């Protein structure tokens, strides 16, 4: 059983070459546009600090927003699909240290039933900042 835990990242990585994310619906695209309105995208980053505590917004089963403050939001396009996120399932990230990084394994679970509903990995983090005046 323990071997499967170590193989999971390799299996997911092997699938990423053929994975195509589900396009956003009109409603999801509008929610994303509203959240990023007035902000400018920066260079993608592999990791972000966990602190200060970030506020997670689910756009779709593939797209997340981490709000650090009113001036900074990180967009993350997941590698794979964490099915269930749009239905309110909880995201469980397996990371080590004080940062969230590309490739950190994630599962989604329904806390009422205890059943997992999806598995994916974090992608790159794209910072969106409000331009200075």
Image: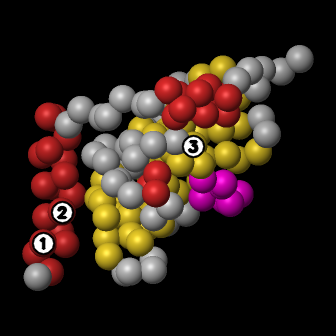
Number of residue marks: 3
Disc 2: CA contacts within 10 A as few (<14), some (14-19) or many (>=20): few
Q: Which residue is mark 3?
A: 65
Q: Is residue 82 left or right of residue 51?
A: left
Q: Quadrant of the N terminus?
A: bottom left
User: Which numbered circle lies on residue 4?
Assistant: 1
Helix, strand or loop at disc 1?
A: helix
Q: Looking at the picture, tell me which residue is in the foreground, 66 or 7.
A: 66
Answer with mark 2 or mark 3, whichever residue precedes in sequence: 2
Relative image position of residue 38 (x, y in whole percent): 74, 21
In the image, the segment drawn in magenta is 50-56
Quadrant where the C terminus is found in the figure: top right
The answer to whether residue 94 shows anywhere in this view is no
Residue 26 coordinates in the image, percent (x, y):
50, 26
The alpha-carbon separation of the residues under discs 2 and 1 comes to 6 Å
In terms of depth relative to the viewer, which is nearer, 93 or 42?
93
Q: Classify residue 112 as left or right of residue 104.
A: right
């Amino acid at each position: 059983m323990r071997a499967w835990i170590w193989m999971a990242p390799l299996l997911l990585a092997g699938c990423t070459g053929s994975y195509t994310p589900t396009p956003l619906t009109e409603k999801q695209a509008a929610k994303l546009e509203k959240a990023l309105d007035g902000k400018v995208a920066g260079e993608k980053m592999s990791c972000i600090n966990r602190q200060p505590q970030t506020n997670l917004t689910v756009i779709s089963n593939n797209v997340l927003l981490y709000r650090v403050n009113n001036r900074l939001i990180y967009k993350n396009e997941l590698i794979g699909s964490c099915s269930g996120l749009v239905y309110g399932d909880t995201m469980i990230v397996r990371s080590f240290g004080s940062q969230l990084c590309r490739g950190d394994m994630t599962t989604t679970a329904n806390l009422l039933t205890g059943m997992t509903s999806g598995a994916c990995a974090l992608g790159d983090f794209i910072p969106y900042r409000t331009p200075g005046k």
